[in-house]
Image (spheres, rainbow, N blue to C red):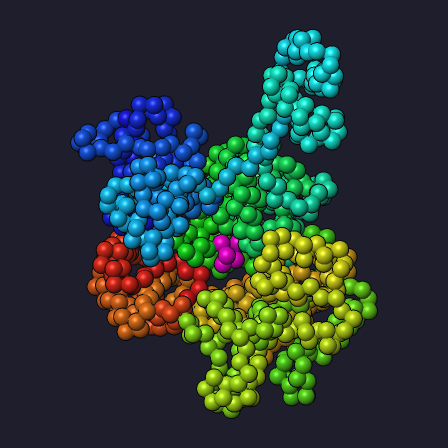
Amino acid sequence: MIAQVIVDVAAYPVDRPFDYEVPKQMESLIEPGSRVKVPFGHRDVLGFVISVTEETEIASNKMKSISTLLDLEPVLTEEMLEMAKWMTKQTLCYEIDALQAMLPSALRAKYEKQVECLVEVSMLSSSLQAHFTKKMRVPYKLFETEALLLELKKAVKSKQVQIVTVVKQQGRIKSIRKFEVHADLTFLQQKHEELSNRARKQKQAIEWCMEHVGERFLPQYLADEIFISASVQKALVELGVGKFVEEELYRDPFTQEITPSYALQLTDEQQVALDAITEKMNEQQPETFLLHGITGSGKTEVYLRAIQHALDQGKEAVVLVPEISLTPMMTERFRARFGELVAVMHSGLSQGEKYDEWRKMQRGEVKVVVGARSAIFAPFTNIGLLILDEEHETTYKQEDTPRYHARDVAIWRGMHYQCPVILGSATPALESFARAQKGVYHLLTLKQRAKTQALPTVQVVDMREELHTGNRSMFSRALADAIRERLEKKEQIVLFLNRRGFSSFVLCRDCGTVVQCDNCDISMTYHRSSEKLKCHYCGDEKPVPNECPECQSEHIRFFGTGTQKIESEIYKVFPEARVIRMDVDTTRQKGAHERLLNDFGEGKADILLGTQMIAKGLDFPRITLVGVMSADTSLRLPDFRAAEKTYQLLTQVSGRAGRHELQGEVIIQSYEPEHYAIELAKEQIFAPFYEQEMRIRRRFSYPPYYYVVLIQVSHEDVMLAAEYASLVHEYIGQHLSNQVQIIGPTAASISRIQNRYRYQCLIKYKREPQLHDVLKQLIKIYRTDWMKKGVLMTVDLDPTSI
């Protein structure tokens, strides 16, 4: 019996299955999807069995055998193995990368070098002996001083020790020790009779056990509540009355109790949308629905009803949300409706919690998963519905290998399970809306808010006028007055700025020097709380300089505005205000998102100040004012989607106001209020923005009229980076048709990150049958030759930004 195995080595020559002989004792256990340890080169590595066969072209004397089987139950289903092949072609990645992406990090291999002693310890040199006093195999890192490495090398040569690589799983099953009562009542009665009357406490304990046959209890509970001490428990074990067992225990990712909720009355629009979705579920037909509903129109209630329909059919559902900050709020709503059937998956969980949630899904103990991008790979085997909330969000695109988009994976799984996919958004991606207009997606529209409240009134303030009238504050007069009014009424306020830190950059007023990161071509951001300058690209930190590093002038000033600076300004202008700041800096700790949002929901703060993590999903009844501090932050980025992202962000953040009984107001501050993205976000109507943006996209040949591919080349030497980018351009130009437009090579907008210079080429095309083959060949050249010269090249077939 032969197993075809993909090994855990991401390298071009080994990106294929290898044949391994299955040992006799494993023949009935090995299945496709199982993880195994296999000898590869001079060490054991992790591998995934992708198929089992009886035939091989390898001679039996050259065939290696599988060393260890890691899973009795396969961790990957047949569907996932098929999906990995599709992802490999779709994203041009290694198959091992696609397989690894589907598993929680706890199931990925951890390779550890160890030193094993092969002789009597006394035969080793004295410096080595000290490390083998208790164990014959110890970690290699104990020998990493220069003197010990020399001794170790001699010992390896003389075969006194050997260096072995151990493959370990990163995650562990959590267990708890319990006392299990014997399951036979007759046996317990017999032990009770045999026991001397002098062993009074033991006899009393057995009498209690006779009332709890086969049950398990915590030893601490027995000692504290039943007064069966540890010594008596030990005696009972020796008598055979009970035994200590390790019981598997799931880590609980949920921090609070949930009050059950019930289905709400649907509006006519919601009912029409739900009927269309459930019809396809009943017919078991794959269909992609674009649920386009204004903010507050009740998209989540449609999701909940559709999921209930899937559960009633005995099927499972996957729900994706874009931001980790949304996950606690969404999870609470789903748990309130479906209780213990809900699992959660996002990066805020510990490795162990992710592992436990994944196993609940694999075992069928839960039926609904709510999570961020990676939850799309939930190991369900009977999916009835897939949902992407806020489908326009760029966080659904994986920026590292494999560069998949969760939307594409959802649609693939929907086809596989013959079930619908719902893409929900108030501001759909232009590509999605264009597909809906063409009939590729089925468009469902919710034009009214679920509680028939009016949309908030939106006012755009021209900050140029504020400057002309002498207002140099961060707050326009309109916004300052509105904040004061809300504070007096005890209503809540959301202030949004898409930039963390205190100031955007530090500048010398004498010579104009801006303090740059040493590793990246980007200015460093001042963080007041730590009194540090930080690079938001490579993470480098510096103390704040007292004088200019170029001209030694003391006229160093902070320019630009970040969330920290606005927070300090709020306390100056509105000293009575209580503020919660939500950005990457305040939400680093586990559970911080949930804690901050709970505090705000409970009225412990008047103002919620934050970056884009607060722009979506928030639903608090007392928010009546939303202030956008600077609408221009993302508008002038060198990216063809800049206007679209600005419009989406403004519309989403505006939708946080007036979602319940109280009327909402939105004030947008801008230095370019006449820009169409800002003007149309004020009107909160999607169609005019869609038409205007589509005209621009058509004129400049951008998606959705054209597809784009971004190829980026980087190297520590700027000349080599430019040279290899030119080779990319030359190769593509020679092998693709003249219908394809190639832009570049040009330096990336941030030309250096982590001391690597970056150049890129952009390919625009409508139809190009040769594209995948040409790119595969280019990647082959890169992996076999350029890589050795320190070049890094990435190919992104659907970039979210350029």
Q: Outermost residue, right direction?
A: 488
Viewer-proximal residue among 360 and 71? 71
Describe residue 167's horizontal placement relative to residue 323 as left or right.
left
Which quadrant of the rendered structure holds the N terminus? top left
Describe residue 748's horizontal placement relative to residue 468 as left or right.
left
Using the rendered view, name the quadrant where residue 754 is placed: bottom left
Please name the residue shown 55% across and 85% down the image: 556
Q: Is residue 203 above or below residue 123?
A: above
Please name the residue shown 48% across and 66% down the image: 539
Q: Judge whether residue 390 is colored magenta.
A: yes
Horizontal and vertical percent for residue 735?
22, 60
Horizontal and vertical percent for residue 790?
28, 63
Q: Judge whether residue 557 is colored magenta.
A: no
Q: Is residue 3 above or below residue 561?
A: above
Describe residue 195's horizontal placement relative to residue 603 as left or right.
left
Using the rendered image of the protein, determine whether residue 240 is visible from the camera's viewpoint. Answer: yes
Viewer-proximal residue among 523 and 611? 523
Q: Is residue 468 above or below residue 193?
A: below
Using the rendered view, name the quadrant where residue 48 is placed: top left
Please name the residue shown 24% across and 43% down the image: 158
Horizontal and vertical percent for residue 272?
62, 45
Numbered range of the magenta stretch: 389-396
